[in-house]
Image (cartoon, rainbow, N blue to C red):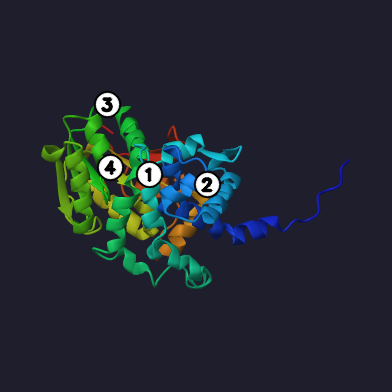
Amino acid sequence: MRPASPPNPSLIFETLNAYQRTAILRASIELDLFTAIAEGASDIERAAARCSASPRGIRILCDCLVTLGFLHKENGAYRLTEESALFLDRRSPAYLGSVTAFLGSPDATEPFHRLARIVRIDGSRETGATLAPDHPAWALFARSMAPMMAAPARMLANLAAQTPPAPGRILDVACGHGLFGIEAAKMFPHATIVAVDWAPVLEVARENAARAGLDGRFHTISGSALEVDLEGGYDLILIANFLQLLGPAACESLLRRIHAALNPGGRALTFGFIPDEDRVGPPAQALFAATMLAMTPEGDAYPFSAYEAMFSRAGFARSELVTLASGQRAVVSHRSGPLE
């Protein structure tokens, strides 16, 4: 029998130094290094010239990127990995470099510098203003994070299409960039989309809808989804990345309003970070709870059982958990029909 490995503090040091990995990637995106290499600047001198940077700095940055798995290196030349080519070359339609604008912003990072205090007081009371009307963080979120949400928005639209009939009127709650409603409009060409969010955010959503050619079918309601008149007559309501920002009481209040806005037999599709019932996996879903703790007064990464209970108390007949092709999760909640 092999002796057990002695305790190793490497995880502690790797985690404490993880901010350095973030800085390496953000600097590479800011310098447009991935695009430079993709365009042929595969050696240190050409990459440095292309990025207007020092050869020594570029050499160290590139070698670190190789170590972290973002680049390959052979005979002194660098090339992109498959993932870097798809997501970090600015010329790629799947380019994700813009997400650094929000993920690296003070609104997203500063609360983590005082996380111990936030844990003591049970929520980010100081940054609760990010949930205030017209806070600029959400317009920035809408503009910078849209590329990251394109694929999930298509998957949610595909999920909606799996159960007939096709919806005629769709509500996109706290729409942000509007991509979830836009992808639903593409999936259902005869549907009308109504998007709700604060006015500065709706400007971004309308721009995206115009680019998608949806001007005549994309309508907006300005204000907080928790307060404004949602109108009614919807067959499908999309709730993407929003309930997790709220405490249970606010979630239930909103869900009652959503239930009232749905036609009999209508559905609500909830997308977000939904961990396992023990709340410790999968890692990306479970760790998001810390983001909500740091950035909101009462938000959380809710497991399915919590959503199921909240939707039930709001009047929904049943809810089911669905795993999308990406491994991300969604909740499908059904309003009872006339015979149910």
The nearer-to-camera label among 4 and 3 is 4
Q: Nearer the viewer, residue 33 or 180?
A: 33
Is 335 placed left or right of 273 in the picture? Answer: left
Identify the residue position indicated by label 4 in the image: 179
Which numbered tag is attached to residue 169?
A: none
- Single out the residue that lies furthest toward the left: 216
The nearer-to-camera label among 2 and 3 is 2
| Vertical position of residue 103 compared to residue 63: above or below | below
For the residues labelled 4 and 3, the Cα–Cα distance comes to: 22 Å
Is 314 placed left or right of 53 in the picture? Answer: left
Kindly state the secondary structure of the residue where label 3 is placed: loop
Q: Quadrant of residue 180?
A: top left
For the point 35% across and 47% down, which residue is it?
A: 311
The nearer-to-camera label among 2 and 4 is 2
The residue type indicated by label 4 comes to Leu
For the residues labelled 1 and 4, the Cα–Cα distance comes to: 10 Å
The residue type indicated by label 3 comes to Pro
Identify the residue position indicated by label 2 in the image: 44
Residue 6 image position (x, y, % from top left): 81, 54
Q: Earlier in the sequence, mark 1 or mark 3?
A: 1
Q: Quadrant of residue 211?
A: top left
Q: Earlier in the sequence, mark 2 or mark 4?
A: 2
For the residues labelled 2 and 3, the Cα–Cα distance comes to: 56 Å
Q: Earlier in the sequence, mark 2 or mark 3?
A: 2
Q: Earlier in the sequence, mark 2 or mark 1?
A: 2
Identify the residue position indicated by label 3 in the image: 164
Is 29 placed left or right of 146 in the picture? Answer: right
Identify the residue position indicated by label 1 in the image: 148
The residue type indicated by label 2 comes to Ile
